[in-house]
Amino acid sequence: MCTLVVATQVWAAAPLVVAANRDEQLARPAAPPHRWARDDEAEIFAPRDLRAGGTWLGVRGAKLFVGITNRYRGRLEPPAPRSRGELVLDALAAGEVEAAAERISALDPALHNPFHLVIADRQQAHLVWNDGERHHHERLTPGLHVLSERSRGAAPTERDALLRRRLDERLGAAEPGLPQWRALLAEHAVDPMEGPCVHADDRGYGTRCSTVVRMDARGGLGFFHADGRPCVTEYEDLSVEAAGELSRP
């Protein structure tokens, strides 16, 4: 996952909205969002990386969201002992935001390559990130936050600034609908790597899918997923499946 836009405590009717694009090698196999569980843990609703077994985002019922981006360090990272996709599963298994943030922060930083991990519900959103040496943990202030692999001082980027401008221009005071979120996530830049929607087919890389998650103030969950680049792929409403009853406690 390479772009996460997090709106926490911005709109009264929807205390949490997350809009996300996953950028990845085009040949890397993945399954679309579905209900599944790791070992004997509680069921989650999430896509799945079929190579490493983890995921880049998911929800646990209508109560907990977790999403991850890699963190750029200017070089190819050697394989770490553990996939970063397992961190999303670790956090969802914790069941609630603060316990999840504590669980991730307590892990050995050397287990995973650098990352930014968002853990959120209707009341709060936390960010745990690994800079390659240690973990950092912060509670996100109410507002709109943009995270990519180059955030928190990782490297210069135009994408974060572009998204901030578009958020200010397009979203305004009223909560946007799915068409507005799609327009944001489908935008391209002159440099194909700098826009939210990445086209780098010559490198075998690009935006693979796009997801919008909305937790409303009444306990409802919206989960909309485009299994392809959002500039050409319609979003499917998976809200009923995502919010279904958990089969395990």
Image: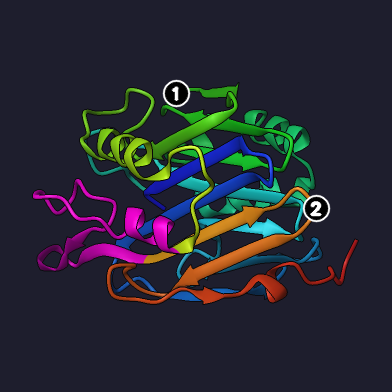
Residue 17 in percent (x, y) is at 57, 48
Mark before the other along the chain sequence, 2 or 1: 1
Q: Which residue is mark 1?
A: 133
Depicted 164 relative to depicted 81: above or below: above
Q: Nearer the viewer, residue 45 or 213?
A: 213
Residue 218 in percent (x, y) is at 80, 52
Determine whether, in the image, residue 201 is placed left or right of residue 151.
Answer: left
Q: Residue shown at 42%/44% (left/top)?
A: 171
Residue 12 in percent (x, y) is at 68, 40
Depicted 176 relative to depicted 25: above or below: above
Determine whether, in the image, residue 8 is placed left or right of residue 96.
Answer: left
Give the label, 2 or 1, closer to the camera.
2
Q: Residue shown at 30%/62% (left/top)?
A: 207
Q: Which residue is mark 2?
A: 218
Residue 104 in percent (x, y) is at 64, 35
- The amino acid type found where label 2 is placed reads Arg
Q: Which residues are magenta?
A: 179-208
Q: Nearer the viewer, residue 204 or 240?
A: 240
Q: Residue shown at 19%/46% (left/top)?
A: 194
Depicted 131 relative to depicted 66: above or below: above
Residue 82 visible in this rendered orientation of the protein: no
Crowding at dot 2, Cα within 10 Å, few <14 / some 14-19 / many 20+, comes out as few
Dot 1 falls on a residue whose secondary structure is loop
Q: Residue shown at 42%/63% (left/top)?
A: 179
Q: Measure the alpha-carbon separation of dots 2 and 1.
A: 40 Å
- The amino acid type found where label 1 is placed reads Glu
Residue 223, located in which quarter of the rendered image? bottom right
Residue 240, located in which quarter of the rendered image? bottom right
Residue 40 visible in this rendered orientation of the protein: yes
User: Is residue 134 magenta-colored?
Assistant: no
Depicted 46 relative to depicted 118: above or below: below
Determine whether, in the image, residue 35 is placed left or right of residue 162.
Answer: right
